[in-house]
Image: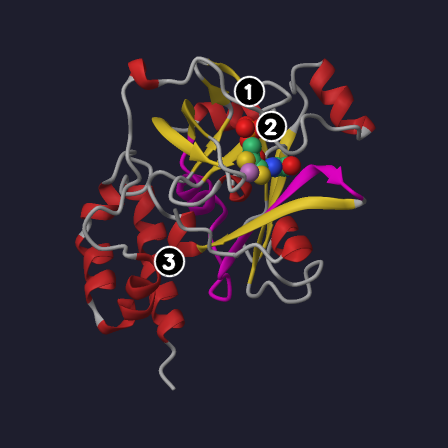
Amino acid sequence: MRDDSGLSRRRLLGLAAAGTGGLLLGGCDQLNRSPGFRSLLEGAEGLTMRSQRLLMGDALAREYGAADISPAFKANGSLGVTDAAYRAHLAQGFAGWALRVDGLVRQPLLLPLAALKGLPQRTQITRHDCVEGWSAIGKWQGPQLAAVLARAGLLPEARYAVFHCADVLGGAPYYESIDLIDAFHPQTILAWRMNDAPLTERHGAPLRLRVERQLGYKHAKFVMRIELRAALAGLYKGNGGFWEDRSGYAWYAGI
Ligand SMILES: Nc1nc2c(c(=O)[nH]1)N[C@H]1C(S)=C(S)[C@@H](COP(=O)(O)O)O[C@H]1N2
Ligand SMILES: [Mo]
């Protein structure tokens, strides 16, 4: 059997390495336009991904204008975190907090909020679609996940990025995961800013994932740690996310 995913991964790693030359750090949709990424999608090794996710053509989720921003953006799921360490950081405006990036990386990272704010920023106005049937348009800002991953440097075995959150729902920690295609997508950002203000606790302070081509439950709030893994098996119940484990929600929640 062909190892399609392995080839894809190698190509993505090449792109990640190119990130230091500005490809992934440059913002916007340069990944989409890059010859390497195009040929990845157009080649035989891209067939599986294409059929799954219609990555060709309009690969970007729709972006809106400032006038479209919803006057009220519902908060859903956990609206806060009880964990004592989290509450201490919240009280100090997350000044001493740092995002942990570890697992299958060359260089594990501890990235303070200031470091995340210091990376090139992407701003996007997008529609959030919750599986429960409501939507809202908001403006999000933060570094591309690709830039953070390029800093850490992925090891060859890395296939998934797992987002470990600070909140516990019904006794289980919230977590989510995406694969490297979504991890390196230009609209996948670690948002610390929403509608021109720092994220509030309800919306996931200090940092949340925006993965714009998927449903709301993939957009992990209160992200404390990003773990790079070869597989999702062996992590909690093995389905790659809190709702995937608990209620059988789809792991790939394409809109
Ligand atoms: N850590 C964490 N992330 C989470 C949730 C949660 O309960 N905990 N709920 C998810 C769901 S179902 C949705 S719709 C969105 C809601 O984000 P919002 O509160 O900013 O509207 O967050 C997602 N991310
Ligand atoms: Mo949701």
Residue 13 got which mark? 3
Q: Residue at x 74, y 27 (%)?
A: 86
Indicate yes or no: mark 2 CB to ligand 1 under 8 Å.
yes
Q: Residue at x 22, y 57 (%)?
A: 36
Please give left or right for residue 170 compared with residue 105 in the image: right
Indicate yes or no: mark 1 CB to ligand 1 under 8 Å.
no
Q: For label 1, count other residues whose C-alpha is less than 10 Å away and answer few (under 14), some (14-19) or many (20+).
A: many
Expressed as whole percent of the image width and height from the top left, the position of residue 18 reads: 30, 49
Above or below, comparing residue 89 to residue 19 in the picture: above
Asked whether the beta carbons under mark 1 and mark 2 sit within 8 Å of each other, the answer is yes
Q: For label 3, count other residues whose C-alpha is less than 10 Å away and answer few (under 14), some (14-19) or many (20+).
A: many
Please give left or right for residue 176 compared with residue 146 in the image: right
Residue most toward the bottom? 1
Expressed as whole percent of the image width and height from the top left, the position of residue 196 reads: 43, 13
Q: Residue at x 27, y 43 (%)?
A: 23
How far apart marks 1 and 3 lie (CA) works out to 31 Å
Please give left or right for residue 235 compared with residue 138 in the image: right
Please give left or right for residue 65 compared with residue 196 in the image: left
The stretch in magenta equals 143-170
Which of discs 2 and 3 lies nearer the camera? The answer is: 2
Which of discs 1 and 3 lies nearer the camera? The answer is: 1
Q: Quadrant of the N terminus?
A: bottom left
Q: Is residue 4 magenta?
A: no
Identified by mark 3, the residue type is Leu
Identified by mark 2, the residue type is Gly
Expressed as whole percent of the image width and height from the top left, the position of residue 140 reads: 42, 25
Name the residue carrying label 2.
204
Q: Residue at x 61, y 61 (%)?
A: 239
Residue 199 got which mark? 1
Q: How is the image coloured?
A: secondary structure
Mark nearer the N terminus (2 vs 3): 3
Q: Is residue 207 visible?
A: no
